[in-house]
Image: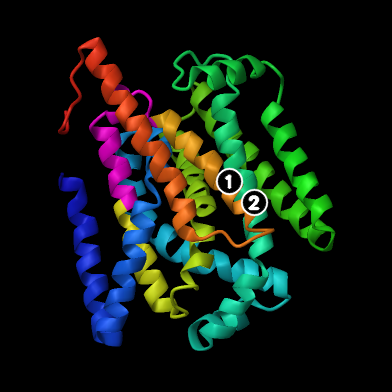
Amino acid sequence: MGVFIFPAVVSVVASLAAFVWGGLAALFLVVLLAVLETTLSFDNAVVNAKVLSRMDARWQNLFLLWGIPVAVFGTRFVLPIFIVAVAAGLSPIAVTALALFNPNEYGAYIEEVHVAIAAFGSAFLFMVSLKYFFNERKTVHWIEIVERYLSRWGGIEAIEVALTLSVLLLCAFLVAGKAATIVVAGVIGVVLFIVIEGVAQSFEMQAGVSAAGTGLALFVYLNVLDAAFSLDGVVGAFAITSSIPVIIAGLGIGAVFVRAFTVYLVRARTLETLIYLEHGAHYAIFGLALAMLATIFVRVPEAVTGLIGLVFIVLAYISSRREMRRLGRKIPTRHP
């Protein structure tokens, strides 16, 4: 459990800073955002753990420690500013000034670019989930009637790309006024997934490539995956507060704990014993992608989005425990 010491320290420091800065009201909002970010990101942690298990211990530590600035300031502060700057035709400096000194107007801009964020995030997450299920080499199935059928279709080259692009084109047709935004942002999400996943796999397959090269590629992939998961959460955070420091502190605490939980899953070899947990996480990712896409048309409460992931993770956990008891295998409760 030592992996959680650093997140605990970060949480205490950020909470004290919030209290000094804005009193009990700011502290309450930081705790609320941290709890929401943590509880709604278990599916992210499970998928990250699968990728992290392909990295050596050095890169796992880098993911936990040095990846935190990327998660807190990069994904949850810098990236939204860059998206707003591109969409609104403003300079990043001007948008940063809005975020720091005029958060209400910045929040309005965030809402305006929500279609682009939703299209990018949903496309990337569709690729993550469909790539997992459309795999003809996949032999372990949780919901067999679904997964066995999808696995057979995995022999069709790039079927996940075709389906994702088809969904984007359908949405663009239904929302003609935002068609270009949906298509461009969605295609960027698809291309980004293909490039990063391809580079990581290429490094792993080449015997002459160092562990550092593979670790770097997977590190980049994990941070892009984290961005896809978290962008919609940044938009949702503005429904709770428009204070940028509070949003960064709250979501940052959640991000740190999610990353610590990811490392714990790897070191405890949880995915090796809870065999359906990864399946549940990818169903949850597919549900999150659908929910993000739905926000283009209607308002989807964050509680609904989070509940989708939580339900799949809990059910997968229960099924995994039942299967382990059936096989008579023990589930480790501590680090090996």
Which residues fall within the magenta stretch? 258-277
Q: Main SS of the magenta segment?
A: helix
* Relative height, residue 95 to residue 159 (above, below): below
Task: Examine the structure image and report whether residue 231 is included in the region drawn in magenta.
Answer: no
Residue 274 shows in this picture:
no
Left or right of residue 235, residue 276 in this image = left
* Relative height, residue 63 to residue 30 (above, below): above
Q: Which residue is mark 1?
A: 289
Q: Which residue is found at the position 61% from the left and 37% from the top?
A: 127
Left or right of residue 141, residue 263 in this image = left
User: Residue 133 sits in which quadrant?
Assistant: top right
Q: Nearer the viewer, residue 330 or 307?
A: 307
Label 2 Cα neighbours within 10 Å, binned few <14 / some 14-19 / many ≥20: many
Secondary structure under tag 1 reads: helix
Residue 71: where, in percent of width, then height?
A: 42, 58
Q: Which residue is mark 2?
A: 293
Residue 137: where, in percent of width, then height?
A: 54, 14
Q: Nearer the viewer, residue 217 or 6?
A: 6
